[in-house]
Amino acid sequence: MYDIAIVGAGPAGSTLARLIGNKHKVLLIDKRDLENENPKKITNKCCGGLLAPDAQKMIANPQLFAVRTIDLTNNLERLYQRFYFNMDREKFDRWLVSILPTGIDKKFNSTFKNFVEIPDGYEIRYIYNGQEISAKTRVIIGADGAFSRVRNFICKDINTPEKYIAIQEWFQCQNYTPYFTAIFDEEISDFYSWIIPKENYILLGSALRPRDNTREKYDMLKIKLTGLGFNFDNKIKTEGAFINRTKRVSQLYLGRNGIALVGEAAGAISPSSAEGISYALKSSLYLAQSLDMGIDGFLDRYKQKARNIKLNLLIKNLKSPAMYNPFLRKLAVKSGLQSIK
């Protein structure tokens, strides 16, 4: 019998487990093997690996970075100063797992299936090493990302954030580019695309609408950027994932009864940049603080603490038109406001 079962060991789930520590008996489930590196594995979590300032405040890793903004729709370009920390996302996840308290019961290479309600809690089922395992728990935490099975079980498709497909490819690169590139092009996506340097590689990614010729539009993006001088000849690997875009505050759903959601599973992700790690860390901190006061009434306390996440999402949605409306973006970029040389 566990006190808390956490589904997902990314930044949200592993941070929550660490902050809970040995105060409760915790089960942590993830489909990846985050303790043993597999050199044959070629796909990782599709993530650019940039820590935004809010995330840096929580782990104290500042780094000066610049953002090159390319507006293909309006044929404009600017550089803006931003503070990011450029990291290896898979190593970051492994590090978070490595500092977990020894009392956490970790079940990696496990796939969460479902749960049923029982007296005093829930019985969850998951596949571990090819076998179906069941476990009883008082609380379930969904930290399982954009396509959260936990969220789907408790609220189905009601008022969920918009889904996008993120495609990201790695290319070998001889010269390191000292900035992150954000690309806007309505012909490709109503969201955005990106180029991120990683030592001897560059990552080209794009957030695309599902069932809207996603692969063709991604290839079109490569052709357009090749015309600007980018080189995408030496491809190493391709990654993909669904990501949420929370366009309304009502799409942030934190849970019900003894089931809570954190990070992207809750819809806590930037609607303007799709940055989710800072929200994962914050929501996990708020939930851990709520559980620290006892399991009874924890969800009400969590919702109260998470009100500033709602406010943050509201502000970002109010700012989004300046980025994603072509006319307003043209005015902002041409003004040169806050740009650097």
Image: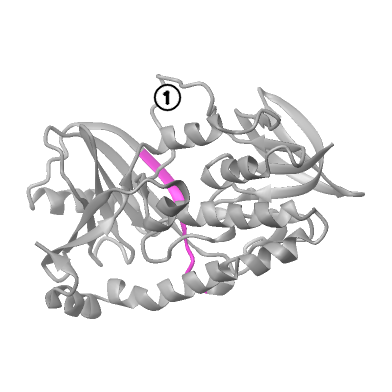
Q: Which residue is at the far front?
A: 60
Q: Which residue is at the far right?
A: 119
- Closest to the observer: 89 or 149? 89
Residue range of the region highlighted in magenta in the rendering: 239-248
Q: Amino acid at mark 1?
A: Lys
- Closest to the observer: 96 or 147? 96
Task: Find numbered disc 1 in the image and state the secondary structure of the residue it sits on.
Answer: loop
* Res. 44 visible in picture: no
At x 26%, y 60%, the residue is 188
The quadrant in which residue 32 appears is: top right
Residue 154 position, x and y percent, is 71, 58
In this rendering, the count of numbered labels is 1
At x 21%, y 60%, the residue is 81
- Residue denoted by label 1: 41
**Is residue 65 rendered to the left or right of residue 93?**
left
**Is residue 68 rendered to the left or right of residue 256?**
left
Quarter of the image where the N terminus is located:
top right
- Closest to the observer: 327 or 107? 107
At x 52%, y 60%, the residue is 268
- Closest to the observer: 50 or 142? 50
The quadrant in which residue 125 appears is: top right
In the image, is residue 242 part of the stretch drawn in magenta? yes
In the image, is residue 37 part of the stretch drawn in magenta? no
Quarter of the image where the C terminus is located:
bottom left
Residue 110 position, x and y percent, is 64, 31
Residue 15 position, x and y percent, is 57, 44
Residue 161 position, x and y percent, is 52, 64
Query: Which secondary structure is most common in the magenta stretch?
Result: strand
Mark 1 burial class by Cα count in 10 Å: few <14, some 14-19, many 20+: few
